[in-house]
């Protein structure tokens, strides 16, 4: 559906909104104005998590002022799990920079992350306004809480692609791409264990477990955010 929408979008920027979420009426206007006279390729806002009981919590609690990235630092901070984030819905994408970029329809889990990564490799400037005008509903029984399936290995496929691109184009950021891969491996293992499905997918999961065990703790301290390191 998103690829179909991209074919017909005409605006300067493109936003993505989940059908059961909502945004404040001036959210996108404020985000665009926050970029001032520049036209950054990507504008990063913020969002509020709405829990089933109606309580709300702002996602980026430690960010209190705008920030700008060039392409190198944007890719680095994205891979390192910092303030750019992996969600589509708190961002505005410059349509001209999207160009012919499409969502990979073969990827079922993690396609948003990969789209953002590919977009950043084409971007020259990213601006963080961090305006919290999007409301994301925390859904019970979401994909992250469901039974383990082969689709969860899509994130590993994406991480391998990112490793390959980084090695060929940004070797100075390879350690950050490796950190993302290790984090993806850890989360995949975690979900398999929680679903009590490790033995069922043992041949695919065991190499991930070995990779994590071989990962150096000093690299984790350097590349991971506190949330990723403790998670």
Image (spheres, rainbow, N blue to C red):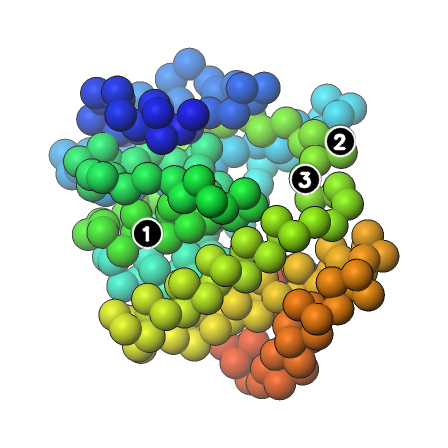
Does dot 1 land on a helix, a strand or a loop? helix
Does dot 3 land on a helix, a strand or a loop? helix
Q: Dot 1, crowdedness within 10 Å: few (<14), some or many (≥20)? A: some
- Label pair 1/2, CB-CB below 8 angstroms: no
- Quadrant into which the C terminus falls: bottom right
- Rendered residue at 82%/52% (across/down): 195
Asked if residue 225 can be seen in this view, the reply is no
Instruction: Calculate the distance from the C-alpha at mark 3 to the C-alpha at mark 1.
Output: 23 Å
- Label pair 2/3, CB-CB below 8 angstroms: no
Circle nearer the N terminus (1, 2)? 1
Is 209 left or right of 28, judged from the image as shown?
right
Residue 98 vs residue 49, the one in the foreground: 98
Does dot 2 land on a helix, a strand or a loop? loop
Instruction: Calculate the distance from the C-alpha at mark 2 to the C-alpha at mark 3.
Output: 9 Å
User: Could you tell me how many numbered marks the image carries?
Assistant: 3
> Hey, which quadrant is residue 218 in on the image?
bottom right
Circle 2 residue:
140
Is 29 left or right of 140, judged from the image as shown?
left
Nearest to viewer (mark 1 / mark 2): 1
Circle 1 residue:
118
User: Which x, y percent locates residue 93?
Assistant: 30, 36
Residue 23 against residue 172 in the figure, above or below: above
User: Which x, y percent locates residue 4?
Assistant: 35, 25
User: Which x, y percent locates residue 100?
Assistant: 22, 39
- Rendered residue at 75%/31% (across/down): 140
User: Which x, y percent locates residue 127?
Assistant: 29, 45
Residue positioned most to the top: 25
Circle 3 residue:
143
Is 174 left or right of 231, judged from the image as shown?
left
Residue 213 vs residue 66, the one in the foreground: 213
Residue positioned most to the left: 37
Is 72 left or right of 202, judged from the image as shown?
left
């Amino acid at each position: 559906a998103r690829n179909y929408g991209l074919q017909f979008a005409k605006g300067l920027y493109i936003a993505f909104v989940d059908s059961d979420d909502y945004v404040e009426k001036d959210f996108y206007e404020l985000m665009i104005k926050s970029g001032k006279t520049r036209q950054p390729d990507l504008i990063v806002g913020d969002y509020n998590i709405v829990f089933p009981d109606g309580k709300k919590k702002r996602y980026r609690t430690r960010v209190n002022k705008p920030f700008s990235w060039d392409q190198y630092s944007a890719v680095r901070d994205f891979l390192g799990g910092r303030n750019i984030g992996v969600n589509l819905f708190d961002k505005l994408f410059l349509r001209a920079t999207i160009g012919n970029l499409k969502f990979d329809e073969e990827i079922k889990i993690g396609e948003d992350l990969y789209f953002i990564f590919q977009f950043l490799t084409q971007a020259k400037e990213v601006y963080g306004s961090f305006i919290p005008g999007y409301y994301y509903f925390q859904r019970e029984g979401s994909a992250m809480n469901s039974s383990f399936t082969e689709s969860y290995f899509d994130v590993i496929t994406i991480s391998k692609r990112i490793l390959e691109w980084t090695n060929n184009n940004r070797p100075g950021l390879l350690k950050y791409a490796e950190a993302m891969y290790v984090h993806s491996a850890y989360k995949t293992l975690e979900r398999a264990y929680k679903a009590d499905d490790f033995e069922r997918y043992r041949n695919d999961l065991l190499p991930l477990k070995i990779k994590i065990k071989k990962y150096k703790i000093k690299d984790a301290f350097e590349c991971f955010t506190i949330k990723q390191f403790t998670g």
